Image (cartoon, rainbow, N blue to C red):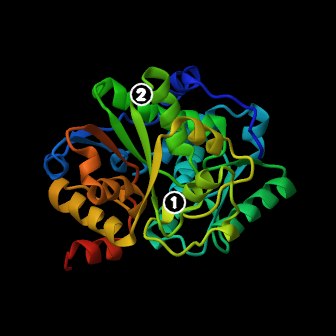
C-alpha cells in the first residue's frame, strides 16, 4: 500500500484520541528510580505493557476500525501481525461485532497465538513475517476484504501517536523519548505528536541488531528489502520483518526521528530482567529495546529527562522465567 503522498498532522492524532478514548486506557507514566540512578538523569517509563491488550497496538487498531465505512465493516477485515497487532485487531473486531482473519508467522510466540484464539478469530500461521504479510494481502484481494496494515496506515499511525500526547501532558519537560521501532507505526505517530508541540525534544528509535531493516534503510536513504539486510531471529519478535515498499512510516521517520540505536540480544534480555527486578514490570523483547539503549549508552542520557516507551508485555512465560531466573 503506497501512501507516500498522504499527510498526517497533530489534528489527526488529537482526533484519534477522542475516537479511541472509550475503548482504551491512558497508561501510567512511572518514574524509574533504578534507571534514573543508572544514567544519573530522570527516567520515566510509559507503560503500554499495562494497556488493555498488554500492548500499544490496540490504540491504532481501534482508530482504524472505527474509521471504516459501513460497507467495509460488513465485508470484514484481514491483517498480518507478529502477534500484538493481531491480538489488538481481534479484540477491536469482537467489540465492534466484525469478522476478522489474521495471518501470523509460524514463529509467533505461543502466548500471542493463544491469546488471539481466545477471540474466536480465524487465524492462519504462515511462513516468516514477510511471507505472512504477502499472504494476508493476497487473501484480502481474493476475498474482497479490507486489509489493515500493522503500521503503514494513517489511522494506525494517528492512533499510536496518542501515546506522545499523553507523555507531553504528564512530562512536558521531557528532553528525550526512546521508542521501539520495527515497521515504524509507533515511532511515526509519536514523532508527529512530539515534534508538532516541541521540535527540540529528541525522538530516538530502538531496534534489535538482529533485525535492523529500518536502521539500515535510514542509512541507505531508501527502504531496503528484507533480503538486502542480514536478519536473524530476535527475542524482540514484535520488531522483526521488513518494511512495505512506499511505507509512509519511513518518510515520517526520516523527517522526525533524530536517531536510531541498535541493541544486542543480550542487552534486551538484561533489560527484561532489570525491568522486572527493579520496576516490577513484565515486558516482552520488543518492549524492552528502549531500556536496552539506555543501558548500553548511559552517558548519552546523563542529566537528561527521558521517557522510555515500554510498548508491550506479551512475553512467553517460559522465556520470561528463564530470563528472570524465576523457578516454578
Between 5 and 30, the one lying in front of the other is 5
Q: Is residue 5 above or below residue 313?
A: above
- Displayed quadrant of residue 201: top left
Between 127 and 179, the one lying in front of the other is 179
| Structural distance between the alpha carbons of marks 1 and 2 | 23 Å
Residue 278: x, y in percent?
A: 15, 57
Query: Can the viewer see residue 21 in this picture?
Result: no
The circle on residue 239 is: 1
Residue at horizontal 71 percent and vertical 69 percent from the top: 131
- Displayed quadrant of residue 288: bottom left
Residue at horizontal 35 percent and vertical 65 percent from the top: 268
Q: Is residue 288 above or below residue 203?
A: below
Residue 64: x, y in percent?
A: 63, 37
Quadrant (top left/top right/bottom left/bottom right) for the C terminus: bottom left
Residue at horizontal 28 percent and vertical 74 percent from the top: 323
The circle on residue 165 is: 2
Residue at horizontal 54 percent and vertical 23 percent from the top: 10
Q: Residues within 10 Å of mark 1 (few under 14, many from 20)?
A: many
Image side of residue 221 versus residue 190, left or right:
right
Amino acid at each position: 500500500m503506497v501512501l507516500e503522498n498522504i499527510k498526517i498532522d497533530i489534528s489527526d492524532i488529537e482526533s484519534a484520541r477522542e475516537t479511541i478514548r472509550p475503548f482504551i486506557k491512558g497508561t501510567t507514566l512511572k518514574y524509574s528510580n533504578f534507571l534514573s540512578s543508572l544514567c544519573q538523569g530522570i527516567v520515566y517509563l510509559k507503560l503500554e505493557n499495562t494497556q488493555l491488550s498488554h500492548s500499544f497496538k490496540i490504540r491504532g487498531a481501534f482508530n482504524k476500525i472505527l474509521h471504516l465505512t459501513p460497507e467495509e465493516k460488513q465485508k470484514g477485515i484481514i491483517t498480518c501481525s507478529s502477534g500484538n497487532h493481531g491480538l489488538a485487531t481481534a479484540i477491536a473486531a469482537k467489540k465492534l461485532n466484525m469478522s476478522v482473519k489474521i495471518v501470523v508467522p509460524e514463529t509467533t510466540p505461543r502466548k500471542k497465538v493463544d491469546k488471539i484464539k481466545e477471540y474466536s478469530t480465524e487465524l492462519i500461521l504462515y511462513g516468516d513475517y514477510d511471507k505472512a504479510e504477502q499472504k494476508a494481502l493476497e487473501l484480502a484481494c481474493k476475498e474482497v476484504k479490507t486489509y489493515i496494515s500493522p503500521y503503514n496506515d494513517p489511522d494506525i499511525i494517528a492512533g499510536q501517536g496518542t501515546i506522545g500526547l499523553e507523555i507531553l501532558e504528564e512530562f512536558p519537560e521531557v528532553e528525550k523519548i526512546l521508542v521501539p521501532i520495527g515497521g515504524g507505526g509507533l515511532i511515526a505517530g509519536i514523532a508527529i505528536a512530539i515534534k508538532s508541540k516541541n521540535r527540540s525534544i529528541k525522538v530516538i528509535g530502538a531496534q534489535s541488531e538482529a533485525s535492523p531493516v529500518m536502521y539500515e534503510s535510514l542509512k541507505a536513504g531508501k527502504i531496503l528489502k528484507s533480503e538486502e539486510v542480514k536478519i536473524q531471529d530476535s527475542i524482540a519478535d514484535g520488531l522483526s520483518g521488513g518494511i512495505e515498499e512506499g511505507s509512509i512510516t519511513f518518510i515520517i521517520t526520516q523527517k522526525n526521528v533524530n536517531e536510531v540505536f541498535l541493541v544486542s540480544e543480550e542487552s534486551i534480555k538484561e533489560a527484561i530482567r532489570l525491568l522486572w527486578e527493579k520496576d516490577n514490570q513484565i515486558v516482552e523483547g520488543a518492549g524492552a529495546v528502549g531500556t536496552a539503549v539506555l543501558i548500553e549508552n548511559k552517558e548519552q542520557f546523563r542529566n537528561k529527562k527521558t521517557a522510555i516507551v515500554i510498548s508491550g508485555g506479551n512475553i512467553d512465560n517460559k522465556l520470561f522465567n528463564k530470563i528472570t531466573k524465576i523457578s516454578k
